[in-house]
């Protein structure tokens, strides 16, 4: 991709377009990228320069066009008023690293299951059970984040549908 836009150098939308330009020269220019995405060139420039936030449908269009599905996750985790409080941003590693993370987060699943059964059998989470319940929730969050990262890797690299 020709020259680097230094003002946009750390903008995730600019970085996604730059990554896409490595395999598709149409994304080397903001003009052609905007045309493919279906937005105005100046709007794309303002998004990449952080002067305006993108609309969710623009993020979805960029993620699809650039083949960077993690862009939607990053938008939800960083910019969406609701998502900022409920969505964890994930990073996509190489497949072997992701597979190990998923397997590592699942290694204690039997003890988590047994602990959850023990806590829930009376239908009440007692004060003394709260630390164990929090550990269960933390483990489930780790499993969820690792599973989402693996899913995004699959969407990006082998075109598995989301």
Image: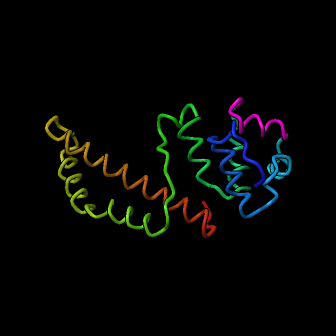
Q: Quadrant of the N terminus?
A: bottom right
Q: Which residues are magenta?
A: 40-52
The answer to whether 40 appears left or right of 53 in the picture is: right
Residue at image point 56% right, 44% down: 74
* Picture coordinates of residue 56, whole percent (x, y): 68, 40
| Secondary structure that dominates the magenta span | helix
Q: Nearer the viewer, residue 89 or 143?
A: 89
Whether residue 49 appears in magenta in the rendering, the answer is: yes
**Above or below — where is 82 with respect to 150?**
above
**Image quadrant in which you'd find residue 58:** top right
Who is closer to the viewer here, 79 or 13?
13
Q: Position of residue 115 (x, y in %)?
A: 20, 53
Q: Position of residue 3 (x, y in %)?
A: 76, 48
Name the image quarter holding the C terminus: bottom right
Reply above or below: 51 against 133.
above
Whole-percent x and y of residue 93?
Answer: 49, 60
Q: How many marks?
A: 0
Identify the residue at image location x=22%, y=43%. Answer: 123
């Amino acid at each position: 991709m020709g020259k680097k836009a230094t003002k946009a150098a750390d903008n995730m939308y600019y970085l996604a377009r730059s990554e896409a330009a490595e395999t598709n020269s149409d994304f080397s220019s903001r003009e052609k990228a905007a045309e493919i995405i279906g937005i105005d060139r100046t709007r794309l420039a303002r998004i990449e320069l952080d002067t305006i936030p993108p609309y969710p449908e623009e993020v979805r269009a960029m993620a699809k066009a650039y083949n960077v599905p993690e862009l939607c996750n990053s938008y939800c985790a960083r910019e969406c008023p609701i998502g900022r409080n409920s969505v964890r941003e994930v990073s996509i590693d190489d497949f072997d690293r992701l597979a190990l993370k998923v397997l590592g987060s699942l290694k204690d699943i039997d003890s988590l299951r047994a602990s959850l059964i023990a806590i829930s059998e009376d239908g009440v989470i007692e004060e003394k059970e709260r630390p164990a319940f929090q550990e269960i929730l933390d483990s489930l969050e780790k499993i969820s984040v690792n599973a989402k990262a693996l899913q995004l890797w699959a969407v990006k690299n082998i075109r598995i549908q989301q």
